[in-house]
Image: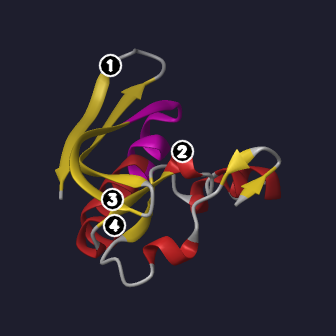
């Protein structure tokens, strides 16, 4: 499926696959406009995640990032999708590792670093 020239994941690819559509940048953090919210559903932002990674482990990293953003006021978040397995969901390779790095934008210091494996 394509919207405005961008690929969107196909919901049926995930049906009964054992994987969730894991958002790297969560929709809830970009709901200020319809356009920003829609951008979080493009395929570049969605990767196959096991239910535990998506609903528990990755969610913890999102919540910690929100906490740090409120404390440091300006942060830069870097997400790295890495170490792919040979499996696929539809045409999408399944990552083995999701990495999140959060930097304080004022000082440039790395304030949070985590690797989540599935």
Task: Identify which residue is drawn at 23% across, 36% down.
Answer: 113
The dot on residue 109 is 1
Q: Is residue 77 magenta?
A: yes
Indicate which disc, 2 or 1, sits on the residue closer to the N terminus.
2
Neighbour tally class for label 2: few under 14, some 14-19, many 20 plus, Cα within 10 Å: some
Q: CA distance from mark 4 to mark 2?
A: 16 Å
Query: Which residue does the numbered mark 4 point to in the structure image?
Result: 54
Q: Position of residue 61 (x, y in %)?
A: 31, 53
Q: CA distance from mark 2 to mark 1?
A: 27 Å
Q: CA distance from mark 1 to mark 4?
A: 27 Å
Q: Quadrant of the C terminus?
A: bottom left
Q: Magenta span covers which residues?
A: 66-79
| Tag 4 near tag 2, CB within 8 Å | no
| Tag 1 near tag 4, CB within 8 Å | no
Query: Which residue does the numbered mark 3 point to in the structure image?
Result: 88
Indicate which disc, 4 or 2, sits on the residue closer to the N terminus.
2
**Of the residues tagged 4 and 2, which is closer to the observer?**
2
Res 83 → quadrant: top left
């Amino acid at each position: 499926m394509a919207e405005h020239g961008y690929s969107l994941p196909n919901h049926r690819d995930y049906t009964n696959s054992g994987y969730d559509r894991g958002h790297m940048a969560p929709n809830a953090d970009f709901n200020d406009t319809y356009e920003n919210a829609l951008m979080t559903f493009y395929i570049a932002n969605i990767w196959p995640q096991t239910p535990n990674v998506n609903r528990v482990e990755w969610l913890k990293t999102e919540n910690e990032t929100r906490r740090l953003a409120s404390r440091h006021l300006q942060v830069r978040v870097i997400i790295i999708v890495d170490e792919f397995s040979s499996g696929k969901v539809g045409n999408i390779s399944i990552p083995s590792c999701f990495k999140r790095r959060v930097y304080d934008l004022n000082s440039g210091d790395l304030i949070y670093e985590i690797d989540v494996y599935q």
